[in-house]
Image (spheres, helix red, strand yellow):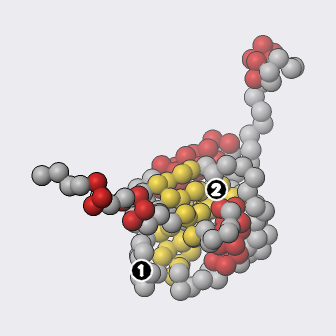
Amino acid sequence: MRIPYRFWVNTAVDVPARPEIVAALLKEQDRVLLCHRSLLRRWFPDVWDLPGGHVDPGETPGQALVRELREELSIHIVEPSQPPIALISTKEYHMQVWLVESWTGTVTNAAPDEHDDLAWVDRCGYGHLHLAHLDYPGLLAGVLTATASRLDSSGRRPRPRWIPRQVRATVNGGRD
C-alpha cells in the first residue's frame, strides 16, 4: 500500500542538528594534555578527552575554542587562523580539533565539575587510557610522532641536514 504524499514526514526537519563541538590538542614539547571527564557527566562520562566544548549560538568555532579553554583550563589562546587539524563527525556531534602549541597562563583544572583530572601524556602514556573517541589514538600518535621526529634525544631540535642544491631549489619553488 502506498502512503499518499500528504502524509509523508520531512525527516530532515524533524531530526535535531548535531551539536558543533570544538576541541584543542594542547601540545607542550613531546606531551599533550588530556582531561578525564567526570563520572557525573551526562555525555561520555569516565573517559579521557580533549579540552573543549559546544559552540554557542552566534559564536564562531574559533571564538568557542578560546572561550572553552579559558573556562576549563584558565588559559588564553589566540583565536585560530589555521584550519583544524582534524574533523570528527559522529551521529551525536560534529567536532573540529585544533593543535594549540602556545598559550598564556598556567594550565589548571578550572572546571572540576566537568573534569576530575588532567594529565600530560607522551607517546607511551595514552595507550592504556579509555579515550572518548576511537580516532584519538591516531590523532595523538600523529601529533606526537611528528614532535618526536623533530627532536633529538636531548629534547632539542636537531641541526638541519645538508640538502643538495637541486633538491633545495625544488623545495623552495625554484628559489635557492
- Residue 12 is left or right of residue 145, and the answer is left
- Residue 31 is left or right of residue 155, and the answer is left
- Residue 175 is left or right of residue 66, and the answer is right
From the image, which quarter does the C terminus lie in?
top right
Q: Residues within 10 Å of mark 1 (few under 14, many from 20)?
A: few
In percent of width and height, residue 80 lies at 73, 57
Toward the viewer: 7 or 85?
Answer: 7
The answer to which image quadrant residue 70 occupies is bottom right
User: In the structure shown, which secondary structural element does the residue marked by tag 2 occupy?
Assistant: strand
Residue type at mark 2: give it.
Answer: Trp
The answer to whether one can see residue 129 in this image is no
- Residue 140 is left or right of residue 59, and the answer is left
Q: Nearer the viewer, mark 1 or mark 2?
A: 1
Toward the viewer: 8 or 74?
Answer: 8
In percent of width and height, residue 109 lies at 62, 80
The answer to which image quadrant residue 5 occupies is bottom left
Vertical placement of residue 67 versus 114, above or below:
above
In percent of width and height, residue 151 lies at 68, 45
Residue under the image location 75 percent in, 61 percent down: 79
Residue under the image location 42 percent in, 80 percent down: 42
Vertical placement of residue 161 versus 15, above or below:
above
> What mark, if any, has residue 98 been given in the picture?
2
Vertical placement of residue 98 versus 43, above or below:
above
Residue under the image location 77 percent in, 33 percent down: 160
Residue type at mark 1: give it.
Answer: Arg
The answer to whether one can see residue 176 in this image is yes
Taking the view exactly as shown, the residue that stands out farthest to the left is 1
In percent of width and height, residue 18 lies at 47, 63
Vertical placement of residue 100 versus 160, above or below:
below
Mark 1 or mark 2, earlier in chain: 1
> What mark, if any, has residue 77 been given in the picture?
none
Can you identify the residue that label 1 sits on? Answer: 42
